[in-house]
Amino acid sequence: MLNADPLLQRPKLLNTALVARALEGLRPNARTPVEMWQMLTERYVVDLDAAATLLPADEPETHWLPSRD
């Protein structure tokens, strides 16, 4: 996560609609979700809960153990 410079003014995205609008603008430049998170947090002060609902984390595939007979 970025160490924010307190002297640098960045726009605040404090609700899901604003975060969604910003993500649409950043989407053409980001190749991966990681790049999207990085660009979002570098350029804006973001409500991370709102961003997480729109960019959910990739969950690993469940690996089931074989059953015992």
Image (spheres, rainbow, N blue to C red):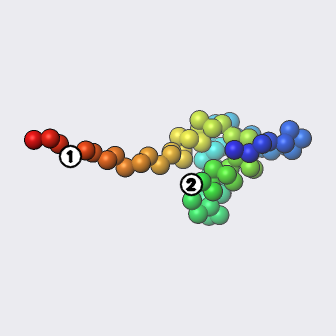
How many numbered circles are shown?
A: 2
Tell me, for residue 46, which label it has, or none. none
Viewer-nearest residue: 65 or 59? 65
Q: CA distance from mark 1 to mark 2?
A: 33 Å
Q: Earlier in the sequence, mark 1 or mark 2?
A: 2
Circle 2 packing at 10 Å, graded few (<14), some (14-19), many (20+), is some
Q: Which mark is residue 33?
A: 2
To which quarter of the image does residue 19 belong?
top right
Q: Quadrant of the C terminus?
A: top left
Structural crowding at the residue carrying mark 1, measured as other residues with C-alpha within 10 Å and reported as few (<14), some (14–19) or many (≥20): few
Q: Amino acid at mark 2?
A: Pro
Residue with the most extreme front position: 68
- Dot 2 falls on a residue whose secondary structure is helix
Quadrant of the image containing the N terminus:
top right
Q: Are marks 1 and 2 in contact (CB under 8 Å)?
A: no
Percent x, y of residue 21: 63, 49
| Residue for badge 1 | 66
Which of label 1 and label 2 is nearer to you? 1
As rendered, which of 65 and 57 lies closer to the eye? 65
Question: Residue 46 location, x and y as percent?
Answer: 69, 40
Query: Amino acid type of disc 1?
Result: Pro
Q: Position of residue 7 (x, y in %)?
A: 89, 41
Q: Is residue 7 above or below residue 36?
A: above
Residue lying farthest to the left in this orientation? 69
Q: Residue at x 27, y 45 (%)?
A: 64
Task: Say which element carries label 1.
Answer: loop
| Residue 35 position within the rendered picture, expressed as x and y whole percent measured from the top left | 63, 56
- Residue drawn at (41%, 48%) of the image: 60
Left or right side of 22 for 52: left
Residue at 74% of width from left, 49% of height from top?
42
Point out the residue furthest to the right here: 7
